[in-house]
Image (spheres, rainbow, N blue to C red):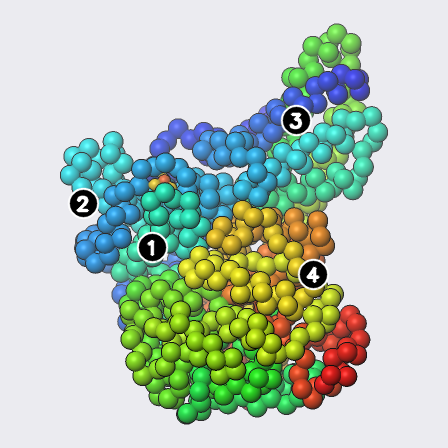
Amino acid sequence: MALPKPEELVPKSYQPPPTDWMDIPVKFRRGTYLYGARAKNLEAVGLPNPREWSPEDEDWKLPANWQEIILEGLRERLGRFRSLQIFMDCCVRCGACADKCHFFIGTGDPKNMPVLRAELLRSVYRREFTTAGKLMGKLFGARELTVDVLKEWYYYFFQCTECRRCSVFCPFGIDMAEITMIGRELLNLVGCNIDWIAAPVANCYRTGNHVGIEPHAFKDMVDFCVDEIENITGIRIEPSYNRKGAEILFIAPSGDVFADPGIYTLMGYMMLFHEIGLDYTFSTYASEGGNFGLFTSHEMMKRLNAKMYAEAKRLGVKWILGGECGHMWRVINQYMDTMNGPADFLEEPVSPLTGTRFTNASSTKMVHIVEFTADLIRNNKIKLDPGRNDHLKVTFHDSCNPARAMGLLEEPRYIIKNTCRHFYEMPENTIREQTFCCGSGAGLNSDEYMEMRLRGGLPRANAVKYVHDKYGVNMLACICAIDRVVFPALMDYWVPGVGVTGVHELLGNALVMRGESLRETDLRGEPLPVNDGEAKEDA
Amino acid sequence: MQAIVTAHKKVIIDKWYQAVLVSYPPETVRFLRGEGDQFANPVGTTIYRSLQGLVEEILGDSKGDKEKITTCLDAIIRIRAIQDFTPSAALAFILQLKPVVRGELAAAIQEKDLSLAELDRRIDDLALMAFDIYMQCREQLYAIRVKEIKARTSRLLQRANLSLQPDCFSDSETDRRQEPAQLTPRPLTQPGIAGT
Ligand code: SF4
Ligand code: SF4
């Protein structure tokens, strides 16, 4: 047998394919797809077609009339969401979005070009809902909805993090995230969700948080932080739970309560609240800011979100303060008020320390903690010693949702600059509105998907590597709990030597608290770089 | 030899890059080749820069700086090890340098009766180094996966005095169907929590 030449080893599929993109079927290879939703998780919230199945199976055990279900679902949504109809019709294929998706950049797979991702749905739309598509078929870019097409939807709609980077570049503002959301909704109609979304949804529905933790365990975790904080600062904090009549209900993403390194961010929040004497309470029922309903369907998002207002009402608080989370804020900022509002029983948020009215939240009644904290700093309400973060060279990742869905660009930077002395921005075309996604958002942060996540996270990591090499950056700050969970893996692989932190962890370190003992370590228990003499004298 | 190689270096790099690009679909190749911004196109620019570095090191007179060679190889392989390639396809690019050099220097080789034995040996060395790097990358992929699972519920586990057993990390979907090992806290945490 003659040995193959190197160029022959390169698989044919990677040489110019003789076929149109429509004809290349999807291959489900371990590491590059997400496990299918388990029956019990669909049953828990009454989603259709619960069954045990795997995307690798030939037979996906779809209902007999699955095509009808999906097409009817699409028809209904075209009527309900005017934006969808517009997005289906108005793309001129200019290609401006094509190379802006981190998944395209990292995988090199053309079907990850946003314009082609949209075509996955649009091709079926054309065939079923346009005359030209019905008559001309493929010539008009139209195709029938087959099982292979459905599998392709599953593969690629769960390979979009709904980050909306592409839409920044589209002259028509076509929002790919919304197309993906509809695509996922349609998949859900026939039971084709991923388990990494279905399980948190089921958990959240049952217990109020993604991890499925019940009230006593939630309290236990927060108490654990109380002990840690006491060890480090000598100050015993006394948080309250489900306390009626508190002024503010505080809701954090559960990642900050249960996971590393999010837990240090939670400690930062609690230290701050203690120091300023905030009248707040945790809820062990609204114990999750995140909302994986957003990645399932509009209905599910609404259902899971409703608990926030329900708890606020039950406890009789004035307004809600929310932690550092990404997609949570997209839901709050863009959907909550319409879905579950108006929350007339709450008041327009006013900072009890500074008197600042958060008029931007006058309708939702929910304030992002970085706005709240930035306002405290601006009004000199807290004392900070940035020297305690001197061992850190920090850069900031604009989490997609706070950046692109809220425009929260300056506040986190303002806090970082007041709590750290070494701050370096990543290159311009990778931050702010143009920020690159972590590659694991929108429910894709499962471990079985690690290989794909590393591809999707490459552009972001590449920019971190740049500031790491150039300035010695060793800490990546972010304001999203999913970021905090997924970036450590991404950094380990692409930029070893860079840690991950929430902005309020930096704040917790720098915060000079009244009556605190000399701090010997930071919140992670690592020895502090300099002796904190000055802070002690003042305290 | 050195003078000849220097004269052809740029062309050799470009042709080698071209050979590597063939492993990507044509739409992607247009982007990888066309976009020069290193942040907009990290894959294309990293591969190009690293190939350039490798050519500098192994076509030069000296034996080449091992550290620099490793850095360049690592940068390319780290990307290709997690893209949709078989191991052979991911690493084939190294051996593709041989035909590129032969094609480009054909005339000179004939004219001056040059021997490429030394160069071939260096390329073979590269290939061997590449195996190691590729394996490291893949092993790291699995290691960080396990690390992430632990970190995700580390605090709960710590609080509950539990540690994850290795069989919790089974990747078999069949196993998963019987005993879910992913974001299903009940079996992992509930008993411990209840006991604390
Ligand atoms: S929304 Fe983000 S992940 Fe989805 S296609 Fe656009 S850039 Fe890619
Ligand atoms: S930028 Fe907008 S109009 Fe242009 S191809 Fe992309 S989606 Fe279509």
Q: Please give the chain letter of the residue carrying mark 3.
A: B
Label 1: chain letter = A
Label 2's element? helix
Q: Which mark lies nearer to you, 4 or 2? A: 4
Identity, as a three-letter code, of the amino acid under mark 4: His
Alpha carbon distance from label 2 to label 1: 19 Å
Q: How many marks?
A: 4
Q: Secondary structure at mark 3?
A: helix
**Amino acid identity at mark 2:** Phe
Crowding around mark 4 (Cα neighbors within 10 Å: few <14, some 14 to 19, many 20+) is some
The residue pinned by badge 2 equals: A129
SS at mark 1 in the image: helix
Packing grade of label 1 (10 A; few <14, some 14-19, many >=20) is: some
Q: Is residue A38 visible?
A: no
Instruction: Residue under label 1, please give it.
Output: A178
Q: In percent of the image, x 19 and y 44: which residue is there?
A: A128
- Which mark sits nearer the N-terminus, 4 or 2? 2
Specify the subunit that label 4 lies on. A
Q: Nearer the viewer, residue A481 or A31?
A: A481
Residue B188 in the image: above or below residue B12: below
Q: How far, Cα to Cα, is label 1 from label 3?
A: 43 Å
Residue type marked 3: Ile
Image quadrant occupied by the N terminus of chain A? top right
Quadrant location of residue A288? Answer: bottom left
Residue A351 vs A152, above or below: the answer is below
Q: Residue at x 70, y 74 (%)?
A: A385
Task: Name the residue type under label 1.
Answer: Glu
Q: Count neighbours of disc 2 (C-alpha within 10 A) and say few if under 14, some if 14 to 19, many if 20 or more.
A: some
Labels 2 and 1: the sequence-earlier one? 2
Q: Are marks 3 and 4 on the same chain?
A: no
Residue B35 pos. (x, y %): 53, 35
The numbered disc on residue A422 is 4
